[in-house]
């Protein structure tokens, strides 16, 4: 059994991991750590966990429980500060923030500057041991890494939505547009006027228009696939859905490329992937396909009138976009079945 | 492995059972039956089931697959018509409707007349083999039965909410009031103007005021506990929640009864019950405690100013109120661990 | 034109008054006062007001604009502190809080103690000039008053729902039960974890069970009608509706009283009332009847099996439950048509 | 007073017009016509209209009431069939469907073929008397017309969002992308499984991907402004908002064009327009700006990294996208103040 310690257990990312790991046949949670609510049982905070997980939340300084892996479900710059201690004791590490998504100090600095953080990485020595945790693109690297930088939720949706077309060179990747809509849980559990129920229930709006920090991950990933620099237009919106991301991916199709070639590229690229579903233009897709699951559903369309590929990319932002990917990465780190704990229907309606 | 056939698989009650049985270590679904969508995979109708359950829906007349138990997730009078065939082949039966909730033809006739159905029971011979499927009140009977009449969702909430106080004789049970609110999924998956999204999103209303058919089950159950006839006031309302029932139970407390006696009565009555949580007046409870779980949470309060007991009874109408109880009853019918497949956190948020 | 100054303009109670007064042919807003956001236009905070009301928010100390009436859409104990200054200048006053709902210092003290406030009234000299602002019960008093204590939203719903039956002596008013459900806007615009969108969207829960401070107003009002002391059981719940209150009123009907007598009592009591609609048991009612309007809709039912009257009382908590009643009271204070500004359909859906 | 007859009064488009015209100082509704619910008062169907509009719904064949203008809030091909009778009697006509949005039989035929309708226009003689009802682009034509083809809701949002940039030649208008999200009311009041509350509440999905019929209107309008043919990529999605459309407009900015030039183009183009608000990149916009109003809010952004203009275009689909534009057009047809009846704050929250 892989022993898991979750730091930042009291947030949505922590509770998501608890829900998954409860079902995981080869892993168990041994410690829940948070700055807030220490001394309380997690099931007091989240009563749906009663009888499922009744562990007591401990303070970050409490080091009494050993584990094999630590999940940092924490804000930027927390994981990088605490990671060295765990690393030196042989823990593997999955960090949800941007701390280990970039393998150079320069790239981190650029990322950090976008969100007004200090730009110095606090654990540069660890970067060579890290991998970017988008399993469908970096499975082998993750398998060899000690630390995984879990990808941003929007980046999962966008990168998976465009990767096959970019890799196969089917589209003009210098002019791609990503129109992304997220549910409210993407902003976490902290109450704010923007997410106050009476304000949000019939509200929708763009935010940080073309300035969202996840764009860096997407451009890096697509650039690697294209073999060159890529700049994308990436627009983020929040709508009154609780969990889910829907990203429309638009790209001009190169001369002479048919719909069947595009579809084949997607099917081939994701062949055998346990969590990717490709749907053709005669089908349909929506949040229902992915809500409560670790799946990414890609609905591949072509606007023949304008020669534009339109891929609708759907994930559950709290699963494939966060805790689900974290567990998927943990499974790879420990050589377990990659789907362990993750084959779940969620619940409908 | 208990082999399960689900008739009426395409409704919310069917899909709920599929979600649970997928997790069940000692049961497996062998056939999905419905009048609609035969020939389609269930995962085409419910895409979140992709890779979880991809069985093809068969017609009721298709008798090619054998099973140990059949779930009738069907409207009133379907189960009683088809049950004899299954019964004679040795199947056990769990029926979601009112068909087997009453053990006499007379009681059934009264029930049926309330909802304008034919009043003759079509399988009176089977009634002696049936039990009422509220496990906390009839566990022993269910264990000896062949057929279980799964209780109405409101009846689960109301009966469990009042049972201990009535049994212990702490309240004036001739003047009890049950104010019940249900989420919209209680009306099933059939679209209707009342549940059209733009109409329902900020709507709340009572319906069948004091005429809901579930009142009969509740009065019968409480009457059995009281050892006499009981008439209750039972009012049903629908609100823009998707899954969940919250019932306020009001009863005048008998002279000299203290809050501690009431609380003790609830704690004693449900001692050892795996799915019942009693919360005292210093705690709190809400739909979050039960959503996605098979739990019934009872928050026991006393208005000392008026001498009125106020119990807030919460269930997930699709789990403890329907498919969860169905599987719980199946577990009892087959001597399995009663919680098998049912210890699930749901998902939050 | 009646000149209106709104103190606490930035909250839901303020914006509600602005929306109404914009339509009011005989009143105009001359000043918006708030502690927060001074110097900003109200339409910056509430962009739907752009071009409707673009007044700048001023600080409470800014006394440069004269008015005829001041609305205190402020928390408890703000109005009573500031009222004397306005009163001495001849302003009429409508206060939304509990400050002027009670006409004796003793009654105020009891109210204040329930919500853990200081119990001394700061302007006892003003109490003789005040009236309780439930127009249907105190129209004449309001007409003669200088200060109106606008009623609590729950109190409006409950008092109007029970008044005719109590007044006519048709029910046992010592055992009445009020089961009240409110939309989330009742808690105001301040963000909190309980009203965070992802938490609230499928949540429902009771709170302050049988301890809500509005119970005092209701008991006082019903006691006045009954000619004696009344104690009621009053339970409050919050559900994921944005605006609306639905209160179920339960009372045992006295021996020999028929449904028709009850219905007649309601019809007679509210005869000619512009904002009250009585619906008989063959009709139906819901939040749609009142959302966006100043109406109170009473659906009068009788459970003949148990001899229990069940009245479903519906209001929009932000209109008849708050700003609508405030303007209705202002109309009475100034001898205007009581419905001025208040005949609005809201919007559907 | 302009006398208005509304055909199709029982749908959302009808009730929207009723809500507006109730407030209109120079118009009054004289007849409500529908195939369904004839003989009922509209306030029985829509109880929020009680006391606001209690007219009885009459059958289309009932011709007893005279009016000055008829609103066809009806499906495609109803208005064109009935219009000649009204036209010959001198009525002016506002049709909500696609029947009079195209001024040639050829253009209509292409439109009709997209949505699988018969392609012959039934009243070709009337086409020369019609104008396209997007007032900001065709005010003069509307003023001279007898018949107005009210624009499609998506077309309003998209055309207004792109018009200034196209007109000024600032962008590459051969590669524009419109990513449009609509609330559920856009589908009308007819219940369907896709808009069943439990299905829709946490659902979002694209539909008719790049095949929505409104694309024709948008391309025609933008083509007129550009002085040439334009083909756009236009993608439609539905999300769990009740009322509102948010369209992201993407276009590559031509070499050397600055953000200030773009912003100025928008400000100049819409100078003096009563219902258009242009917001610069330092501001923000959301559905709250337009919900319940006849406004179109345009938030003009530039992604300098990729040289892409991103305009967020917001309207209330039931007002500026439907009944609001209809009344605006009526005001122009009759030479009234264009904002009559339309300056309303809606309600918040």
Image: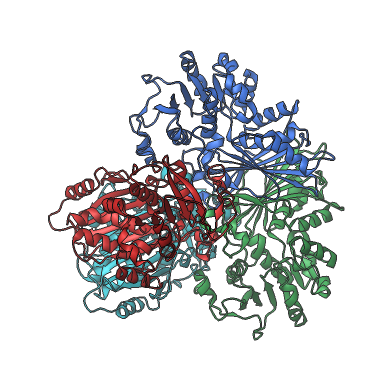
Chain colours: A red, B blue, C green, D cyan
How many tags in the picture?
A: 0
Outermost residue, bottom direction? C64
Q: Is residue D119 above or below residue C187?
A: above
Q: Is residue A29 left or right of residue C81?
A: left
Where's residue C233, x and y in %?
Answer: 76, 48
Q: Is residue B203 left or right of residue A174?
A: right
Outermost residue, right direction? C228
| Of the pair D280 and B166, the residue shown nearer to us | B166
Where's residue D36, x and y in %?
Answer: 47, 44
Within the image, what quadrant is residue C280 found in? top right
| Of the pair C220 and C194, the residue shown nearer to us | C194
The residue positioned 63% from the left and 64% from the top of the image is: C342
Where's residue D65, x and y in %?
Answer: 49, 54
Where's residue B6, x and y in %?
Answer: 44, 27
Q: Is residue C149 left or right of residue D155?
A: right
Q: Is residue D23 visible?
A: yes
| Of the pair A145 and B175, the residue shown nearer to us | A145
Within the image, what quadrant is residue B99 found in? top right
Outermost residue, front direction? A89
The residue positioned 71% from the left and 71% from the top of the image is: C94
Q: Is residue C261 visible?
A: no
Q: Is residue A229 above or below residue B254?
A: below
Image quadrant in which the N terminus of chain C is located: bottom right
The residue positioned 74% from the left and 48% from the top of the image is: C266
The residue positioned 75% from the left and 55% from the top of the image is: C215
Within the image, what quadrant is residue D107 found in? bottom left
């Amino acid at each position: 059994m892989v022993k898991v310690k979750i730091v930042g257990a009291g947030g949505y990312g922590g509770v998501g991991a608890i829900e998954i790991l409860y079902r995981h046949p080869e892993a168990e949670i041994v410690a829940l750590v948070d700055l807030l609510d220490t001394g309380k049982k997690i099931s007091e905070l989240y009563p749906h966990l009663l009888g499922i997980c009744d562990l007591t939340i401990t303070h970050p300084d409490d080091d009494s429980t050993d584990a094999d892996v630590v999940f940092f479900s924490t804000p930027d710059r927390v994981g990088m500060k605490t990671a060295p201690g765990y690393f030196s004791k042989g823990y593997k590490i999955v960090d949800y923030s941007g701390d280990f998504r970039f393998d150079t100090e320069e790239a981190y600095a650029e990322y950090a500057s976008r969100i007004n953080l200090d730009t110095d990485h606090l654990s540069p020595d660890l970067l060579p041991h890290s991998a970017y945790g988008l399993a469908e693109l970096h499975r082998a690297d993750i398998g060899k890494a000690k630390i995984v930088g879990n990808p941003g939720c929007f980046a999962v949706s966008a990168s998976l939505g465009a990767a096959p077309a970019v890799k196969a060179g089917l589209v003009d990747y210098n002019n791609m547009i990503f129109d992304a809509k997220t549910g409210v849980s993407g902003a976490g559990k902290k109450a704010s006027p923007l997410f106050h129920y009476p304000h949000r229930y019939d509200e929708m709006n763009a935010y940080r228009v073309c300035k969202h920090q996840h764009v860096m991950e997407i451009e890096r990933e697509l650039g690697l696939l294209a073999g060159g620099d890529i700049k994308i237009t990436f627009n983020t919106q929040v709508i009154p859905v609780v969990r889910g991301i829907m990203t429309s991916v638009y790209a001009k199709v190169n001369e002479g490329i048919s719909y069947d070639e595009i579809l084949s590229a997607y099917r081939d690229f994701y062949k055998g992937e346990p969590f990717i579903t490709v749907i053709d233009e005669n089908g349909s897709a929506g949040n229902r396909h992915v809500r409560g699951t670790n799946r990414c559903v890609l609905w591949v369309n072509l606007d023949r009138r304008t020669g534009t590929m339109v891929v609708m990319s759907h994930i559950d932002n709290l699963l494939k976009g966060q805790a689900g990917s974290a567990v998927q990465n943990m499974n790879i780190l420990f050589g377990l079945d990659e789907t362990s704990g993750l084959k779940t229907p969620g619940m409908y309606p």
